[in-house]
Image (spheres, rainbow, N blue to C red):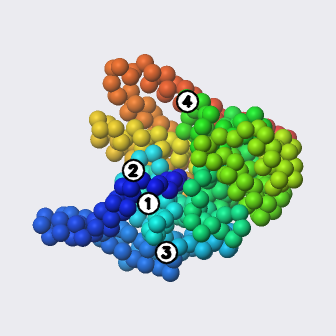
Amino acid sequence: MIMKPTSSPTRGARLRIWRALPVLAVAAALLLGSGAARADFADTQYIHLVYTAGQFTPDELNRVKAIAEDAYAHDSAFFTDVRLPGKITIDLNGRFHGATGMATPGDRGQPPHIVLRYADLDVMGLQPQYLFRHEIAHIFAFYWGAQGGLARPSRASDPLAEGLADYVAGGLDSLGLQLWWGHQFQLDGLWVDPETRFVGWYTMGGGMDRDATMLQRRVAIYDEPALFIKFVIDRFGRDAFRSFRAAYMAAVGERRRITPEATEAVFRDTLGASPSSVLSAFNAAASNAPIPQSEVQRMMLAHEAYASAQEFDLEASRPLAPRRLVASISDEFRALNKAMWSGDLAAAQQHLRAAQSMMAALKGRRGDIMVASVAHAIGHWGGRWRSSSQSAVRSSRRRAARA
Ligand SMILES: [Zn+2]
């Protein structure tokens, strides 16, 4: 996820407060005894890590530093000619809900800045390697202008922002983004027709149905744009995509709108082809990509697990959410992710179902007024989820029968 650069006068003040936090924390620790958390720092060549004192053993800290540096090296191999204005500050103790990381470009002399919920990853289900790659890619992308990079991060909105960060990171969980993902999303009803909704699915949920599931949003905002970027780079080259992105951002502008005429011009000027020909070729390439049966379950499980964890995260952040139930569901997600990462997909699916049914109970306790609409939402969401998993199984059977 990205946070747009802001010119509000409070930003500098906020950063000053943030910078003063270590000092305040030390003072508080002295006053309150050893119970208060104190910020600590660790630097690598390109990264300034901020964490809580005692959060890591020396070995764990070295591992985090290595993952961060690896992610930086990975991303800089794509953004070869981007010069960042300084080290990236990565604060590992984000306190927010609904996402696991946020990136701000830094400007007016401030360094680029990322906040991650590192301690929550075992519940949220993202591997640190992916999360670092994705967020660091946002930072590079801010400075990836049409030629040679921008002196300052662009203030135009970037409809392809999440797609580009995911493309560079190698898709969700760095599983290795491939066009067959699009084929699977088509089979599961998670695919937005790129020809009719070109602008809608690129604009951070703009034009999406209000009752779209977390999984539909994830695919529409992250995966499908990432696959589109992969398609364009594979077919037209990285530099053509770079020009396309810059022209598209400029045409969309701060109003986050684009006319059909402007869309036509962006495609023709930078890719030398009409939007309809490029988008229908993209759609067809996804449809025709063979789905490898050895990988499809893991790919869909990662998506369903993360969408589900995000739903849970939002539910659990409500003030009156019953703590014991929240703790049990957290344990279920931890077990799910552990099983998934170790390759035991059957066990992971079981934990997902268990977490899902407990989440239905969690939602059911929200209050009398909400009961009717919540029940509807659960039915809708649960039904879609099951149908998605079932269709993955069905499609794998179909293909197995064909092969
Ligand atoms: Zn992002």
Q: Position of residue 273 (x, y in %)?
A: 87, 49
Q: Earlier in the sequence, mark 2 or mark 4?
A: 2
Q: Residue furthest bottom?
A: 45
The residue that disc 2 covers is 96
Q: Callout 2: helix, strand or loop?
A: loop
First reached walking from the N terminus: tag 1 or tag 4: 1
Mark 1 sits on what residue? 115
> Of the residues shown, which amino acid type is indicated by label 4?
Arg
Q: Position of residue 101 (x, y in %)?
A: 48, 56
**Mark-to-mark CA distance, 2 and 3:** 24 Å
Front residue (pair 153, 333): 153
Type of amino acid at the residue the image marks with label 3: Lys
Residue 142 in percent (x, y) is at 59, 62
Q: How far across and down, in percent of the image, does residue 232 sit?
A: 79, 55
Q: Are marks 2 and 1 in contact (CB under 8 Å)?
A: yes
Crowding near pointer 1: few (<14 within 10 Å), some, many (20+)?
many
The circle drawn on residue 210 is 4
| Residue in the picture at 18% in, 69% down | 27
- Which numbered disc flags the more N-terminal residue, 2 or 1? 2
Separation of marks 1 and 3 at Cα, in angstroms:
14 Å
Which sits in the foreground, 195 or 288?
Answer: 195
Contact between marks 1 and 4 (CB within 8 A): the answer is no
